[in-house]
Amino acid sequence: MSKRFYVTTAIDYVNGEPHLGHAYEKIIADVIARARRSLGQEAFYLTGLDEHGQKVQQAAVAEGKAPQAYCDELAVVWQACAAKLGLSIDDFVRTTQPRHKAVVAAMLRKLHSQGDLYKAPYRGWYSWKEETFLTEKDRRPDGTFDPAWGEVKELVEENWYFRMAKHQSWLIEHIEANPTFVQPDSRRNEVLGFLKSQTLEDLCISRPKARLSWGIPLPFDPDYVNYVWFDALTNYYSIPAALGDSEAAAPLEGFFDSTFHAPRSALRLWPADVHVIGKDIVKFHAVYWPIMLKAAGIPLPKQVLVHGWWQKDGQKMSKTTGNVVNPIEVIDEWGLDAFRFYVLRELDIGPDGNWTDAGFKARYQAELANGLGNLVNRSLSMLKRYRNGVVPPPHSELANDAGKVLADTRVALENSELQGALLNIWSLVTRANQYVDHTAPFKLAKDPAQAKRLDEVLYNLAETCRVLAVLLWPFLPSTATKIFTQLGLSGLPDKFAAAAWGGLPAGHKIGEPAPLFPRKDISTRISRIRFARQCY
Ligand code: ME8
């Protein structure tokens, strides 16, 4: 089996419920995976949960539950959310799974045996909330620490450290030689700036069990558990190894214990092609993770793709103030594809975004209901009304427009430029809607002498709808499928190659047109949806 295109997301802390930011990231990765599959590659999409560490232990204790029971309960909520988002995931990792823990232990054993890890005492300021020691650089001018760090206390403890010094220069060279390793460029520059201006301090990779017991024990020192970030980052690699990617597992051969059982498999996933993450965790993914891998003799991932953060109404989303966008509620009211469309169309991968309910509704109305929805509905309704739903002979008036959009969309998808791809696809929606206005098929239908011209126009419109379904599949899979069904086509619009012009054969009978995006009275809720009067 050849290597699959392997895309991952950050694994979410299980203490809490999914919000817009989590959903956005998972949808980005889903579109990337679906696009690759549509383009003919095999793809594997991994997401999951980060279940160890201080935050989870504290949250479990606060609810009077054992950490594992607490995680098990919340994992159900998060997995249900993944299903609600329509994610085409191939696996769902939980860092408390034995398959993951066995690989983390093997990685630690190898690094320890090579002398990459050492034990030393440390005195420092510790943020309990962020589970990290702070340095003098983290102090504000008045000597205090930002309240964002939560409670900060001085702590002295022995811990295990990962030697970083020898890794700084090759990492700079690697990032310079591979411009797409960290994307977008602004994030790449940020990482290079950091690496060139500061000496990397050794990374503390343990927590004493006396202080934190909820973690993976260090295989060579039972008084400690592994630092949650070392554990969490390893998920990207542990799952391929555990699923039987033998080339992935090879560098750790001899370091696994008897709990590790990978099936015999021809699966090839590692190295990851894209790690999709948010801007707050770039240093972990673009600095520590490559160093961990390189030290363990494991090939590096190809790309870390960094998205920005969402705010709501110009404010940080926060449970305490109540301004959180709950993706489930939006989907229940507006439909999954409306949510997927909005987040991908509104925010390019990189900058920060701002959710407003008014902005969401405006895009829904203009681009989905009046744009795509109206095009498909009036095109198919006219074909039904004027030709009894039978496709006329092929004609290629819109073929060049569609061909250009197809070529540009392919490039955009190959570069994970998802907003760019949508803008491009919508240029075809707009072109086809204008074509209806210019050709006025409803007038042609009144003149028997224009029958051939009406055939041509109806073919171009129906075929454009078919092409759009294929192009839209990675973004709006359910809408794309509905368009196919309404066109009377069997199967899924999930093969990009099928977007080539001329796929609708003459004489084919389409299905029943129905509105894709019910227009809503903006001032009412879904219970009072009124369907659009079709205008043609
Ligand atoms: O960081 N907008 O988990 P997490 C956009 N467990 N993205 C956001 C966001 C927002 N408002 N808030 C969070 C962790 N995210 C670790 C990851 S990976 C080995 C371990 C993104 O639940 C955030 O940037 O705090 C991150 O990529 C993801 O959601 C999970 O955040």
Image (cartoon, rainbow, N blue to C red):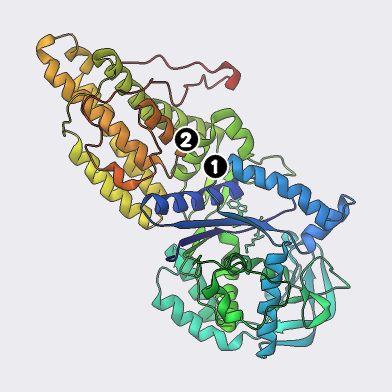
Q: Name the spot of residue 381 as percent of width and height, x first.
A: 32, 18
**For the N terminus, which image quadrant?**
bottom left
Q: What element carries label 2?
A: helix
Spatial distance from mark 1 to mark 2, Cα to Cα?
A: 9 Å
Q: Residue at x 50, y 40 (%)?
A: 340
Q: Mark 2 points at which residue?
A: 478
Q: Name the spot of residue 27 as percent of width and height, x first.
A: 52, 47
Q: Mark 1 points at which residue?
A: 86
Instruction: Give the residue type at disc 2.
Output: Ser
Left or right of 451? Residue 130 is right
Is residue 140 in view from this perspective?
A: no
Whether the residues at callouts 1 and 2 have beta carbons within 8 Å, the answer is: yes
Q: How crowded is mark 1: few (under 14 residues within 10 Å), some or many (20 or more)?
A: some
Q: How many marks?
A: 2
Residue toward you, 293 or 536: 293
Q: Residue at x 67, y 70 (%)?
A: 261
Q: Is residue 464 above or below residue 100?
A: above
